Image: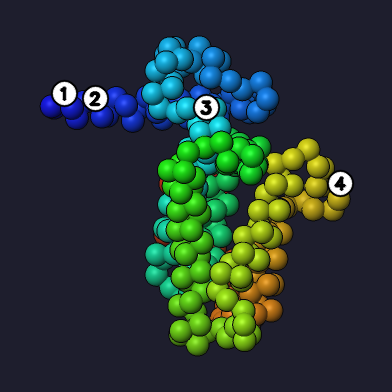
Amino acid sequence: MPASERKKREYVQREDLIIHTARKLLLDMGYLDLNMDRIAEVTEYSKGTIYQHFSCKEEILVAMLSESAEKAGKFLLRGSDMKGKPRERMAAMAVGYDLFVGLNPDHFKAQLLVQNESIMRKASPVLQRKLEGCNQRNMHIVSGVLRDAVAEGHVKLKEGVTAEEVTFGLWTGALGAYVLMSSEVNLNALGVTDPRKAVWDNMHALLDGFGWRPLSKELDYEQTRGRILKEVFPQESAQMGMA
């Protein structure tokens, strides 16, 4: 392997380690106590080496958000590529995101801690654009399936309502549920014994409300979910004990 290629690989590996370390320290110490000195100490690199990659801790955190968004996007993309009707593909993306959160709890929890405008502003324009691009791609993956459903006549959106707005509604509803699931709130005491099933059922109730066919009374989506786990995410579902 040429020396230039080896150096490039080592650079990427070192950057991955910096981001991974920052995520762990963020969860252990919190944002205020996280600093470049501590990151350098744990990675066993000099602070100067850390600065070769990132100018401040906020840049590391924004890069961390991009990494998490890219990882989640891979699950969404696999779900969107499922063979089936658009609503089945939408269901597969929901299963994929659930698996992403379940298998990567640190990614999800860290995201919640740093979704802050002041943090974003301290990052370079390049890193800001990268994160924006990751979020846009994920939005387009989901809204693209909805557009397929509209084109195929499975659902008709009200005049003035865009696919992105519907996607945003699905996204915020699921995100809020996962935030509560990862919090200290005792959902069982509130009568929510199976929050993941509640997310699934609520999503289908919303899609039924849009008139997105096949409706729940026309297709057994629990059976569809089993097929998704088996056909689209066999390894991940086995890791989660859902196979």
Q: Nearer the viewer, mark 4 or mark 1?
A: 1
- Residue 187 visible in the snapshot: yes
| Residue designated by label 1 | 3
Secondary structure under the numbered disc 3 in the rendered image: loop
Mark 4 or mark 1: whose residue is earlier in sequence: 1
Identify which residue is drawn at 56% across, 83% down: 155
Mark 2 or mark 4: whose residue is earlier in sequence: 2
| Separation (CA) of disc 1 from disc 3 | 29 Å
| Residue designated by label 4 | 189
Q: Nearer the viewer, mark 4 or mark 3?
A: 3
Q: Is residue 200 above or below residue 129?
A: below
Three-letter code, disc 3? Cys
Three-letter code, disc 1? Ala
Contact (Cβ within 8 Å) of mark 4 with mark 1: no
Where on the picture, by quarter, is residue 109? top right
Contact (Cβ within 8 Å) of mark 1 with mark 2: yes
- Residue neighbourhood size for the residue with mark 3, other residues' Cα within 10 Å, grouped as few (<14), some (14–19), many (≥20): some
Q: Nearer the viewer, mark 1 or mark 3?
A: 3
Mark 2 or mark 3: whose residue is earlier in sequence: 2
Q: How many marks?
A: 4
Residue 144 picture location, percent across and down: 46, 70
| Residue designated by label 2 | 7
Three-letter code, disc 2? Lys
Residue 198 picture location, percent across and down: 71, 59
| Residue designated by label 3 | 56
Where on the picture, by quarter, is residue 219? bottom right
